[in-house]
Amino acid sequence: MLTIDPQAVSVPVLHHYLQGAIAPRPIAFASTVDKEGNVNLSPFSFFNLFGTKPPTLIFSPNRRVRDATNKHTLENVQEVDEVVINMVDYAMVEQMSLASCEYPKGTNEFIKAGFTEVPSQKVKPPRVGESKAVFECKVKQIISLGEEGGAANLIICEVILAHFSEDILDENGKIDQQKTDWVARMGGNWYARASGEAIFEVPKPSTQRGIGVDMIPDFIKSNPLFTGNDLGRLGNIQQLPLTSEIQEFRSLHHNSDLLQLAKQFLSAGKVHEAWLAILSDIK
C-alpha cells in the first residue's frame, strides 16, 4: 500500500491523491454577487449537506494552489452574505465546466457558459434556470483555514428557500433518484454520473438491531462465494428463520446446491430466503 505523508509532498501531489480518493463529490454550482451587483457563477466540489434544522450546506472555494489568491466567489460572499447553490445534472455538465474558467473579475459566467438567469425570491444572486434543484442561502459564517495555496475557506450556508423541478419528482412530490441524473466530481478530468445501473439501493438498518456478521456461521464467512456485501446483508437481518421454515425449505430443495441458491437469493435481495438456504445446508 502506498503511504503519503501530507507534510512530505507538494500541494499539487497531495491535491491529486485527495481528489482522486475522496470521490465522487457533489458539485455546488454557486451564484453570487459583489457589492456592485456584478454576478459570478462558479462550481465547487468541496461541498455537502451538513444539517437539516437549520438546513445547512457548506462549500469551500479554496485558495488557488498556484498563487494562494482567493476565488471571486469568496470575495463576493464577504461583500454580500448570500449565495444560491444550484445542483448539476448531466445535461448541463459541459456548460458548468466552462463556467469554471478563470475569467476576469466582473465577468458574468451565466453569459459566458450560456445559462439562464432566474431572479431569486429571497436573495440577490440569481438562480440557474437549467438546474433542477436550487437552494437560496444566507451565509452564516466563513471560516478560513490558512493563507497558503490550497487552504480551505468554509462557507457555511443556511437554506432559506429551495426549488425543485417537477422533472425530478415522483407522483407523491418526492425526489425520484432515477430521474435526477446528477453528476459528481472525481479526480483530474473525471466525473461520475448518478443514473441507470450506477445507482442502487442498500436497505437501511431498521430501528431494530441486525444480528451482525459475527453471528454468521464460519463456513459462510470463509467461503469466497460470499462477498463482504453479502455478509453485510446477512448480518442486517433482525431474526433468523424459524426451525419449521428451515425444515420445509430443506424438503423442497434437498437436491439443490444450497449455497449457490443462497447466493442467488442475496443477489435478488431476498435475505430471509438466503438464510433459509444457508441454515438448510447445516446438517
Image (cartoon, helix red, strand yellow):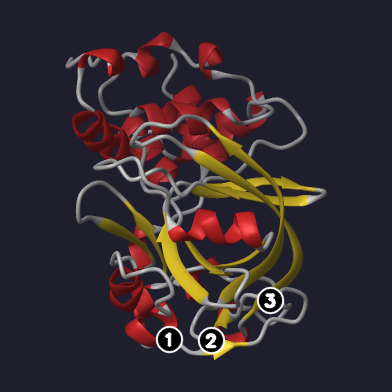
The residue labelled by disc 2 is 129
Q: Which mark is residue 124?
A: 3
Q: Earlier in the sequence, mark 3 or mark 2?
A: 3
Most foreground residue, 257 or 181: 181
Q: CA distance from mark 3 to mark 2?
A: 15 Å
**Amino acid at dot 1:** Phe
Q: CA distance from mark 2 to mark 1?
A: 7 Å
Task: Give the percent coordinates (x, y) of residue 218.
Answer: 41, 9
Task: Give the percent coordinates (x, y) of residue 202.
Answer: 52, 46
Residue mark closest to the camera, 3 vs 2: 3
The residue labelled by disc 1 is 115
> In the rendered structure, are the residues bearing label 3 and label 1 in contact, judged by CB atoms less than 8 Å apart?
no
Give left or right: position of 80 versus 3.
right
Residue 256 is at least partly visible in this image: no
**Amino acid at dot 2:** Gly
> In the rendered structure, are the residues bearing label 2 and label 1 in contact, judged by CB atoms less than 8 Å apart?
yes
Residue at 72%, 78% (x, y): give it: 173
How many numbered marks appear? Answer: 3
Q: Earlier in the sequence, mark 2 or mark 1?
A: 1
Residue mark closest to the camera, 3 vs 1: 3
Task: Give the percent coordinates (x, y) of residue 8.
Answer: 22, 13
Disc 3 crowd, CA 10 A, few/some/many (<14, 14-19, 20+): many
Image quarter of residue 123: bottom right
Most foreground residue, 264 or 207: 207
Give left or right: position of 69 versus 124.
left
Assign a secondary structure to mark 2: loop
Task: Give the percent coordinates (x, y) of residue 32.
Answer: 57, 68
Identify whether 145 is placed above or below 2: below
Residue at 37%, 67% (x, y): give it: 196
Residue at 33%, 28% (x, y): give it: 226
